Image (spheres, grey):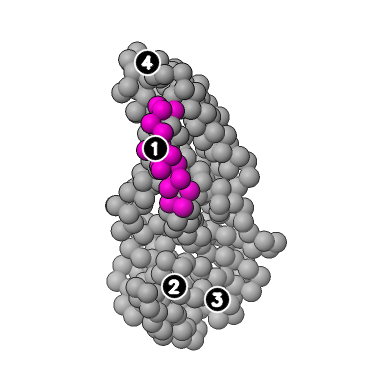
Amino acid sequence: MLLERLGIWPARVAWFLLPALIGPAAASGLDNRSDAVQLVAEILMWAAWFVGMVCLFAPNTVSLTLFRIVAPGSGLAAALLTLAGTPSPGRAALAAFGAALATGFAFLAPTGDVMVNGSAYGPERRLALRTPASLLIGPIPVAWALLVATVVLGPLTLASQRWVVGGILTILAVPFAYVVGRSLHQLSRRWIVFTPAGFVIHDYFVLAESILLKRSDIAELGPAPADPKGTLDISAGAKGLALQVEAKEPLSVVVRDGRNAAVTETVRLIFTPTLPGRLLREARIRGINVT
């Protein structure tokens, strides 16, 4: 697949072009604001763009979390500034296109794959797991919106000379951003890690302890059957092609149950990587029986 081969480069190109695409509409939206508000808004936008560029050229799991926070912010900024001003239809369409392009590439599986693997050590190969569907519907967008609003509203309110409200918002933004950002970062730390010995399923959202599957203990790995009876599903309802790994001997899996943990014995596990084809190729290269 072309996008898999290109990896992170489409996101880099889209992000590099973003200021030229949304800049004219943004300038129109800021025309009627005070000089202080214009200056603060421009600083925030350029700072977000710079952070995104650093993330794309220093890929790791922290970079992935930061980029997936600031990239949708480009869409929000483009929409708000377009509504606040009177840009020409062409400039408005260009801003919408640029924001959609940058945001779309930020959430593509090949982009996440490169950034997750950027944190790998030595002979490791990390491949991301898909985000549970239940989190995509509400919790993640709400947490993201609150995080962005908290970080941005404080400085803009201060620039509008509403000192008390702006000061309170700015002070509260630091602990709030830490707590919410840390929670979102846990979603970037869900992966499969191939090692010389086999592979590890690392997912603190579902598992209380990571699962180590030695190559010699794996009977087979392949697409999950349509009716997976007797299988432990640890995909948390993530959409996409699920894979099933079967062990030669029963595994003790410590699954999260709210704040508690429960030990389950199973020989088959189902999980959902973002790039199942790439994962199966990597498994085959490392001598795992792929069906």
CA separation in Å, label 4 and label 3: 59 Å
Residue type of the residue flagged with mark 4: Asn
Crowd around label 1: few <14 · some 14–19 · many ≥20 (10 Å): few
Q: From the image, state whether disc 2 or disc 3 is nearer to you.
A: 2
Tally the numbered discs: 4
Mark 3 secondary-structure assignment:
strand
Q: Earlier in the sequence, mark 4 or mark 1?
A: 4
Front one among 141 and 251: 141
Residue type of the residue flagged with mark 2: Leu
Q: Tell me the residue at 55%/70% (across/down).
A: 200
Q: Tell me the residue at 48%/56% (across/down).
A: 182
Mark 2 secondary-structure assignment:
loop
Front one among 170 and 148: 170
Which of the numbered marks, if any, corresponds to residue 164?
Answer: 1
Q: Are the residues tagged 4 and 1 within 8 Å (C-beta)?
A: no
Residue type of the residue flagged with mark 3: Leu
Crowd around label 3: few <14 · some 14–19 · many ≥20 (10 Å): some
Where is mark 2, residue-wise?
207
CA separation in Å, label 2 and label 3: 12 Å
Q: Are the residues tagged 4 and 2 within 8 Å (C-beta)?
A: no
Q: Range of the magenta residues?
A: 159-176
CA separation in Å, label 4 and label 2: 52 Å
Q: From the image, state whether disc 3 or disc 1 is nearer to you.
A: 1
Which of the numbered marks, if any, corresponds to residue 212?
Answer: 3
Q: Earlier in the sequence, mark 2 or mark 1?
A: 1
Q: Earlier in the sequence, mark 2 or mark 3?
A: 2
Where is mark 4, residue-wise?
32
Looking at the picture, how far across and down is residue 187, in whole percent?
A: 45, 58
